[in-house]
Image: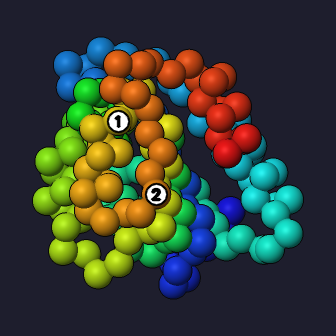
Amino acid sequence: AEDASTAQHRFVHLWSSPLVDAHDSPIDQLGVRLEQQLLKRVLKGSPTPVRWYSKVANQNEFLHAFVNSVVLHYTGHGLHGSVVLEHDLTASNRLLGAMHVFTKEALKECFQDLPSRPKLVFVSACHSELVGEAFVALGVPHVVAIDNETPVLDDASQTFAEMF
């Protein structure tokens, strides 16, 4: 992955796999590393060099990536109408490693006045249809999301990301 501090990246991969939910119950861990390796292999095979990076998805990183990418790929857990992010390092120690539910309403509110948008957002998360619709409402021309009633198996998500 490249340095995230440079201006605009063509492809940004944000991932989230928090350790516990809001009640401190363990959360199933996702195969994020394998998906990163698959994406890296696909992007390196592109006939055109692709500037990209992969980082933990917290709200600040999501905002930065939304403005500074052409393609934004999110990998993580999804709930009906929400994606699950991780708390950033400014959060209290109690929240580190815990899930941060980012609702479609919060997404619209945070992103609506931003100066630019990616051309494509790929939401690799269960039940992400409503979040995908929020990205469309924000003016993202192309959005790929999962049907709101459908959970996604980790292997299926990785295969789809590789073929996509």
Per the image, label 2 sits on a secondary structure element best described as: strand
Q: Amino acid at mark 1?
A: Glu
Q: Horizontally, is 30 left or right of 42 in the view?
A: left
Q: Amino acid at mark 2?
A: His
Nearest the camera: 18 or 132? 132
Q: Horizontally, is 39 left or right of 65 in the view?
A: right
- Disc ID at residue 157: none
- Residue 56 in percent (x, y) is at 47, 50
- Residue 52 in percent (x, y) is at 63, 67
**Residue 100 visible in the picture:** no
User: Taking 86 as reference, is 107 above or below it?
Assistant: below
Residue 136, image quadrant: bottom left
Specify the farthest residue to the front: 141
- Residue 68 in percent (x, y) is at 45, 75
**Dot 1, how many residues are within 10 Å of its Cα: few (below 14), some (14-19), or many (20+)?**
many
Mark 2 sits on what residue? 142
Mark 1 sits on what residue? 129
Quick one: quadrant of the N terminus? bottom right
Q: Horizontally, is 122 left or right of 42 in the view?
A: left
Q: Horizontally, is 9 left or right of 118 in the view?
A: right
Specify the farthest residue to the bottom: 7
**Residue 60 visible in the picture:** yes
Per the image, label 1 sits on a secondary structure element best described as: helix
Residue 156, image quadrant: top right
Residue 60, image quadrant: bottom left
Quick one: quadrant of the C terminus? top right
User: Taking 20 as reference, is 40 above or below it?
Assistant: below
Nearest the camera: 134 or 15? 134
At 72% from the left and 41% from the top, the residue drawn is: 162
